Image (spheres, rainbow, N blue to C red):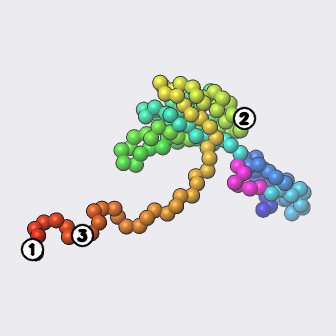
Amino acid sequence: MVYNERDVSVLSRFRVTTLVCVRSRGEVGRLTQVKATDRMATKLYVGGLPYSTTQDEIQTAFGKAGSVTSVSIIMDKMTGRSRGFGFVEMASDEDAQKAIEMWNGKDFDGRKLTVNEAKPLEARPPRREGGGGFGGGNGGGRRNSW
């Protein structure tokens, strides 16, 4: 892929293997090859969160390590209650590393946090079709034949 110079800020969020640059007149400078899968680790997994923790509290706590881009707490679909973990995206790798050092294994509202680099979601095998249940049979009720 070829990127314009204005795209450099976007590219800075990725690990660049070869540098490619196209100037506005179409002159080719260096060659840049960027893989989105090689994205730098600015997204952090945060486990062990107290169920009452809010996004603002996490934003404030992780803001002590650097600039926080986004915070999301994973909620249970059925109950609407926090599942006790979430993700924090930091503005730079340095901020992310500082946050890991500052919060991993530390106490937060009475619970020990686990903070590390978020890993991409792995593909799951497809779910089995059909319902569970009580499997066929004659259903219950009265027995008509002896």
Q: Residue furthest front?
A: 146
Residue type at numbered disc 1: Trp
Mark number displayed over residue 137:
3
Q: Nearer the viewer, mark 2 or mark 1?
A: 1
Residue 108 placed where, x, y %?
52, 26
Label 3 Cα crowd, 10 Å radius (few <14 / some 14-19 / many 20+): few
Mark number displayed over residue 146:
1
From the viewer's perspective, is 125 left or right of 104? left
Q: Nearer the viewer, mark 3 or mark 2?
A: 3
The N terminus lies in quadrant: bottom right
Question: Is any atom of residue 9 visible in this view?
Answer: no
Q: Main secondary structure of the magenta part?
A: strand
Label 2 secondary element: helix
| Chain part drawn in magenta | 34-39
Question: Is any atom of residue 19 visible in this view?
Answer: yes
Q: Label 2 belongs to which residue?
A: 94
Label 1 Cα crowd, 10 Å radius (few <14 / some 14-19 / many 20+): few
Number of marks in the rendered image: 3
